[in-house]
Amino acid sequence: MKEQYVDSFLKAVQDVFALMLDLRAERANEENVEKYVTTDGANVTIGIHGDLSGTVLFTFPEKTALEMVKIMSGMEIDKMDSFVVSALSEVANIISGNALSNLNGYNYSCDLDPPRVVDAGTTITTGKEAVKLPLKTGIGEFALNIALEKEK
């Protein structure tokens, strides 16, 4: 997978986390994966189509998810519910939109599908090369699983 695909999402995560959450998001060691396995917590997938096609899966462990929404809302959040999942879906959508803007700088024109929540424990197969990009923040870790390829 081209590094510019991963870098575009990394920059988007870092920008959105700095602006919305006042947090740094640092890249951990990425790895190539053949399939996604979702975690406990919130899992959001966003489809991408256009010059590039594929899927990005955001996996937020429960602790990280609750802390993110607590910071965003200013409210005490102690359980995963529809409010938390909706907020995380919107964050994933914002990050993905920013990543597509970054990719536009490399002359890729793409559109997003609406975010879709995936139940914990579900295995998603990509059918294409994927990169798992773990990220560390002051409130916990989460990951992006990026499976993109250039349309032929």
Image (spheres, rainbow, N blue to C red):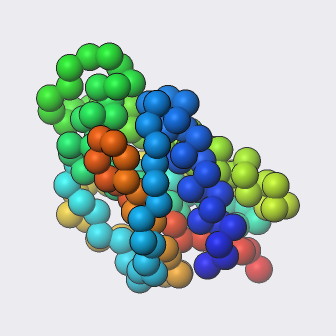
Which residue is farthest top?
A: 74
Residue in the picture at 46% in, 30% down: 22
**Image side of residue 102 versus residue 21, left or right:** right
Residue in the picture at 28% in, 47% down: 140
6 in relation to 11, above or below: below
148 in relation to 64, above or below: below
Of residues 76 and 146, the one nearer the viewer is 76
Q: Position of residue 147 (x, y in %)?
A: 53, 71
Which quadrant of the figure has residue 16?
top right
- The quadrant of the image that shows the N terminus is bottom right
Regarding residue 135, the answer to whether it shows in the image is yes
Which quadrant of the figure has residue 121?
bottom left
Residue in the picture at 29% in, 26% down: 70
**Image side of residue 104 versus residue 143, left or right:** right
**Image side of residue 27 versus residue 54, left or right:** left
Residue in the picture at 44% in, 31% down: 21
**Image side of residue 15 versus residue 62, left or right:** right
- The quadrant of the image that shows the C terminus is bottom right
Regarding residue 57, the answer to whether it shows in the image is no
Q: Position of residue 43 (x, y in %)?
A: 33, 52
